[in-house]
Image (cartoon, rainbow, N blue to C red):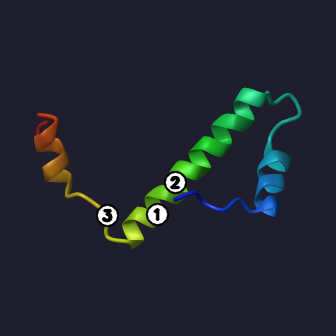
Amino acid sequence: MPIIMEKEEAHRIIDRMPPNATWDDLMREIYVREAVERGLADSKAGRTRDVKEVRAKYGLPE
């Protein structure tokens, strides 16, 4: 499900960037913001995994 963008927040992201920021910089900021929001939404909805379970899946030490 897409996350609704708030125009005011998009403006704040741009306003916080340095004057020499590139389009790639902006895209990275937007991507990170969206990833964090999706993670928070998953957490609130109970769509989480135990760290031990994830480590076991990828063969990582506990």
Instruction: Identify which amino acid the numbered label 1 is placed on.
Output: Leu
Give left or right: position of 4 versus 10.
left
Q: CA distance from mark 1 to mark 3?
A: 10 Å
Residue lying farthest to the front in this orientation: 1
- Residue 21 in the image: state x and y as whole percent: 81, 30
Image quadrant occupied by the C terminus: top left
- The residue where tag 1 is placed is 40
Q: Is residue 43 above or below residue 60?
A: below
Q: Would you say the residues marked 2 and 1 are in contact, meaning their CB atoms lie under 8 Å apart?
A: yes
Who comes first in sequence, dot 3 or dot 2?
2
Q: Is residue 50 above or below residue 59?
A: below
Q: CA distance from mark 3 to mark 2?
A: 14 Å
Residue 47 tag number: 3
Camera-side mark, 1 or 3: 3
- The residue where tag 2 is placed is 36
- Residue 7 in the image: state x and y as whole percent: 81, 60
